[in-house]
Amino acid sequence: MSEYDLVIRGGTAVTATEIAMCDIGVRDGLIAGIGTNLRGRESVDAKGLLVLPGGVDSHVHLDQPFSSGADIADGFASGTASAAAGGTTTVVCHAPQIRGGSLAQAVASYAEKAKQARIDHGFHLLVNDPTPDVLERELPALVEAGHRSVKVFMTYESNRLGDAQILQVLAAARRAGALVCVHAEHHELIGWLTQALLAAGLTAPRHLAWAKPMVVEREATHRILALAEALDAPLQIFHVSGAQSGEEVARAQARGQKAWAETCTQYLVLGEADMDRPGFEGAKFMISPALRQPADREALWQFIRDGVIDIVSSDHSPLRFDDPRGKKQHGEAAPFNKIPNGVPGLAARLPILYSEGVAKGRIDLRTFVSIVSTNPARRFGLAPRKGAIALGADADIVLLDPKKRVCLTNALQHHGSDYTPYEGLELQGYPVATYQRGRLIFDGTQVLAEPGDGRLLMRSAYPEIAPTGRFPTPFDPFS
Ligand code: URP
Ligand code: ZN
């Protein structure tokens, strides 16, 4: 009798710490053997291919309303198809509380939508209305049940929390054992600059970057880092877009704070100049925070090499372009503040990071695996089940052909949006197969996973996000 259900034979397996030519044996959906000459009922020849842990994208929006009221282009079925086509096997999405509503009910109804997921997924608890009942009763119960991350926004009218509310959320999450993630931008400053720009007739898509300059993000990043430091609350800064906010994170880390940061694919390869494309084309690149300058992109790669930024997510926020419910919600003549923000990027993330990162010599292979898979799995309590090629881990595996050349097109994205901001980008290296729990879910052309195949991942308490026990004074407000 064969020993394994599946053997992936002779590839180069890469983890965050090791690179080895070996066979991977899969049994009952788990990695059950790593060695040579393994025997299996099925076998796949991976010679010349990289064998990577499936991508973990820890910042994704699916089936969630936009702040502008525009329609999101991906539900769980299409969004997770896109993930599989790009070598991502786990996503963490946002379960959004409606103001005046219950967080627990929001999570329950989001879990119903997530039943359409083709790949494994977890939820961030998106707290938009931190009432005493939410913070004292609902949130601790949800965290205990396994939703171990919380998201807060410092901007967007329908989401934003004030500093006093943020302190309450940080304290509640610390008590419950959850990691707070933040969208950090200074709301009032954006509003003031927006009004000034509109009054001056500066209304084009590119002026979004003038309404949301780096100082808007730097100030908010600094402020929430200070709040988290005072409470000794671990913090994850989402979508660091350039040098100045990365410097804030680096300073906090140097002080010993448990503060971490992600950037996103788009901040590494796109820039403010893309918003200046002719006609309405610039709208395809409107996101929040805004795209930055070439020097910011260089700084972000350096932060990745230095470990200051150790996760790269997609912030997949897909809108359709040629659609009155998408980017054209208010027509092509709309001023920048009426054009919904967001870009798709789930399928593009892992291949772009390989090509722009490893193939172009900016980062090494192990760093690549760390930022796309191992670190997000660890940070969000999904390890050791996800994010590693290791005995006992889920057999979530991507085979990537490092020689394959691909010109990115929208058709390759398998998402619900009618465009990709990366159209025409030439890549070297591309996923040719994706496995979830030992099952082929993308064969290099087609997505084979069905809606409903994905599992909702509940996460136990994990040490990485335990507070340090250090406060600015001898007073411990939590004792
Ligand atoms: O631009 C991004 N990243 N998201 C937009 C979110 C919203 O609701 O407008
Ligand atoms: Zn986001």
Image (spheres, rainbow, N blue to C red):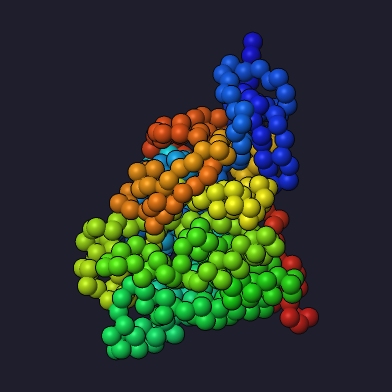
Dividing the picture into quadrants, the one containing residue 403 is top right
Q: What residue sits 59% from the left and 24% below the top?
A: 45
Q: Is 278 situated above or below 192?
A: above
Q: What residue sits 29% from the left and 56% below the top?
A: 320
Which image quarter is the N terminus in? Answer: top right
Q: Position of residue 241 (x, y in %)?
A: 52, 69
Dividing the picture into quadrants, the one containing residue 50 is top right
Q: What residue sits 51% from the left and 58% below the top?
A: 265
Observer-nearest of 157 and 466: 157
Q: How many marks?
A: 0
Lateral position of residue 414 relative to residue 170, left or right: left
Q: What residue sits 41% from the left and 34% below the top?
A: 445
Observer-nearest of 78 and 463: 78
Q: Position of residue 397 (x, y in %)?
A: 57, 36
Q: Residue furthest top?
A: 1
Q: Residue furthest right?
A: 474
Lateral position of residue 148 relative to residue 194, left or right: right
Q: Position of residue 186 (x, y in %)?
A: 48, 80
Give the image quadrant in which the ligand numbered 1 is located: bottom left
Q: Position of residue 231 (x, y in %)?
A: 66, 75
Lateral position of residue 69 relative to residue 48, left or right: left
Which image quarter is the C terminus in? Answer: bottom right
Can I make out residue 428 in this image?
Answer: yes
Can I make out residue 124 in this image?
Answer: no
Q: Is 212 situated above or below 350?
A: below
Lateral position of residue 185 relative to residue 100, left or right: right
Observer-nearest of 447 and 423: 423
Q: Is 281 situated above or below 88?
A: below
